Amino acid sequence: MNVILSIKPKYAELILNGAKRYEFRKYIFKNKCVEHTYIYATSPIKKIIGVFELGSIIRDSPEALWKQLGHLSGMNEAEFFLYFQDAQIGFAIEIKYIEIFNDPGDPEGLIPGFIPPQSFCYLKHSLFPECAAKNHIESKSSTTGPTSHDSQPMEKSIRSDRPASR
């Protein structure tokens, strides 16, 4: 099972350049078998720009999430707490092994009847079977880059020469 996450272009770019290592949500997937997450950059881009493997999903109060992971959020404190306004619980989705598509995919051409999800939607199958399988996503450890909250090396992203629309 895979998902498509709708992400504002500003934050999608921060994910792609490695400044945002966690995606924060008020609600999380109920299906625990999610393997890969496709990044749908919302308007004005409206494209699937990459895919990543999920790491850990942390459930906690927004205050605790900020204290633990704020430096990896790609947001300032005001943006973070505005997003979580009135929420008692939040979720932090770890972004691992990202593949960036050089030729972003038009979801309307890939998924019949596609409607951009408010937050996320499930996919029963990979959009790109040859590129989104765990064994085919290559990554390299960063020796000088940022580290995660548990001090393990972060993984660098790779760029794919495959078009996303295959």
Image (tube, rainbow, N blue to C red):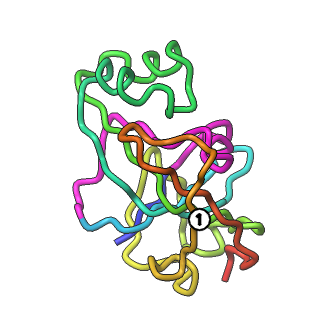
- Residue 130 occupies quadrant: bottom right
Q: Nearer the viewer, residue 105 or 21?
A: 21
- Residue 140 occupies quadrant: bottom right
Q: Quadrant of the N terminus?
A: bottom left
Q: Residue at x 52, y 76 (%)?
A: 132
Circle 1 residue: 140
Q: Would residue 108 appear left or right of 126 to someone viewing this image? A: right
Q: Would residue 100 appear left or right of 121 to someone viewing this image? A: right
Q: Please provide percent x and percent y for residue 148.
A: 44, 42
User: Is label 1 in a helix, a strand or a loop?
Assistant: loop
Name of the residue lying farthest toward the front:
143
Q: Residue at x 36, y 68 (%)?
A: 35
Q: Nearer the viewer, residue 80 or 146?
A: 146
Query: Magenta includes 11?
Result: yes
Q: Residue at x 43, y 66 (%)?
A: 36
Q: Please provide percent x and percent y for residue 165.
A: 68, 77
Q: Nearer the viewer, residue 81 or 108?
A: 81
Q: Quadrant of the C terminus?
A: bottom right
**Up/down of 89 relative to 86, above or below:** below
Q: Which stretch did the figure color magenta?
A: 6-32
